[in-house]
Amino acid sequence: MIKNLLKLVSLVAVAMLSLEARAQLVVDITSGIDDPTPIAVAPFSWSGTGVLSEDVSDIISADLRRSGLFAPVPKEDMLSFPKAPDEVIFRDWRILGTEYVVTGRIEPQASGYLLTFDLVNIFGQQTMFTKQVSGGSRQLRDIAHRAADEIYEAITGIRGAFSTEMIYVQEEQRGGRPSYSLVRSDIDGARPKVIRRFSAPVMSPSWSPDGQDVAYVSFETGRPAIFRENLRTGARQQLTNFKGINSSPTWSPDGTKMAMVLSKDGNPEIYVLDLRTGKFTRMTRHFSIDTEPNWMPDGKSLVFTSDRGGKPQIYQLTLATGQVDRLTFDGDYNARPRVSPDGKTLVMVHRSRGVFTIATMDIVSGRMRVLTETRLDESPSIAPNGAMLMYATKRGDKGILAAVSLDAGVKYRLPSRQGDVREPAWSPYFD
C-alpha cells in the first residue's frame, strides 16, 4: 500500500514538472552584435554530496549569451576546467581567443549554497574580482543570475538585469474554453508561476516600483476593472468600478500614485489615483481619445497616446501646469509610449507602411529608429537597466514574446510551448 502510494506521488510530481516545462518560455536567440566578447564559464566545483538540481555555470553562460554581447565557449571546446584563478593557463585560453574566464566553487551551507566565483582577464593576465553569492536551497537559479549580473557589469559597465523577472498574460484552452492567466517568471522564461487564473480576459499588467505588487485590468466583473494584487500574499484590491473604460494602470516612480484611463465622465481621459487617499484627479480634458499613460522617470510628467491631432501620436503632460506637448511626428501612428530609465529615449509602437513595429525616439533630437522587423509588434516594456526591451509579437498565428536591445543589435524570441503569450511587463530591480 505504501509502495503504491509513493509510486503515485512520484507520478504526480513528474506530471507537475511536465506541465511546468510545457508552460515555460523557450529562448530562441535570433541575432547578436557582430563581434561578441568571447568568454568561458568553466564548470563549477561542488564540495557537497549528491548532484545539484541546476548547473549554475550553464545558467550564467546562457544569461551572457542571451545578452548578445558575449559568445560563451562551449564546454566541449575548453582545454581545461579550472576551478580557481591559479588554475587558469593563460596560453590555452589565448589559443581559443577567449578574453575572459569565469571560475567558481559551490559549497553547501546550513540554509542553502554559497558560490565563490572569479572573473579572470586572459589578455591582461589578472583576476578582475573574486565575489560571493549565497542563497537558499531552492535558489540556485537566483545565485546564477546574480553572478551573471556581476560579470556583465564588470565587463560592460552596465548593471545586469538577469536577476529581474517578468509578468505576462497567457491564453490557452482549458476544458474547451479560453482561460487567461497572469504568469510570473524569470526574465529568461524559467520557473513560470501562475499568479492568478481568470475565465475572462486580463490585460495590462504593471509592476509597482518596489516589485511587491502588480496592477492589471480584469473583465471578471463583466466589465473592465483595475485591480491591485500583492505578489507575496495574493491579497487583492479592486481600485476602480466605473462604467465604461477602466484601463492602462501604471505606477508612479515613487509608488504613491497610479495613472490610468477612465471614461466615467463620458470620454476616455487620463486620471491619476492617489493610492494613499483614494482620490482620483482628472489630468486631461479633450474631446479626443487620451489613453496609455506612462510616467517620466522624475514623476513630474506623463507621456500618453492621443488622436487629438487626427491620428494616434504621443504627447507629454506636465502635471504641475497641465501643459500638453506633442512628442512624435514621424509616421501616421505612434502609440503605447514607454520611457527609458534615464528619461532620454521614448519607446513606442510605430506604424510605417502599414506594418506595426517597435521603435525608439531620442526625446531631445526627435530622431526615430525602428528596432523590429516583424509584423503586429506591441506592448513594449523596458528593462530597468535600459539595455533591452521585451514586447509581444506574432509567429504565424501564435502570440509570442520577443526582446530587442535599444540599439537593435541584439534580438531573441521567447515562444511558449503552450498557448499564446502577450503583454509582457519587465520587473524593476528587487533591491
Image (spheres, grey):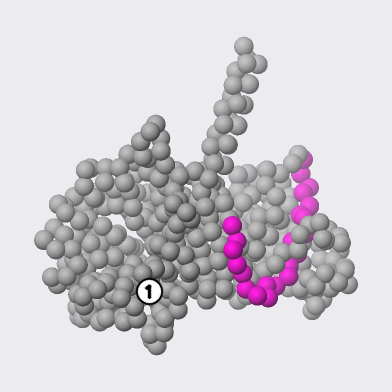
Give above or below for 70 relative to 400. below
Identify the residue at the far left of this view. 265
Q: Horizontally, is 293 left or right of 31 in the view?
A: left
Place of residue 211 in the rendered image (x, y in percent of width and height, measured from the top left): 43, 57
Place of residue 276 in the rendered image (x, y in percent of width and height, measured from the top left): 25, 59
Place of residue 389 in the rendered image (x, y in percent of width and height, measured from the top left): 48, 66
Quadrant for residue 282, please give it: bottom left
Residue named by callout 1? 352
Give above or below for 378 relative to 154. above
Q: Which residues are magenta?
A: 28-49
Along the line of sight, the residue nearer the viewer: 305 or 145: 305
Q: Horizontally, is 388 left or right of 196 in the view?
A: right
Residue at 37 percent of width and 49 percent of height:
230
Residue at 55 percent of width and 34 percent of height:
16
Question: Looking at the figure, which quarter contains the N terminus?
Answer: top right
Q: Residues within 10 Å of mark 1 (few under 14, many from 20)?
A: few
Quadrant for residue 105, please give it: bottom right
> Is residue 186 at all visible to an observer of this figure?
no
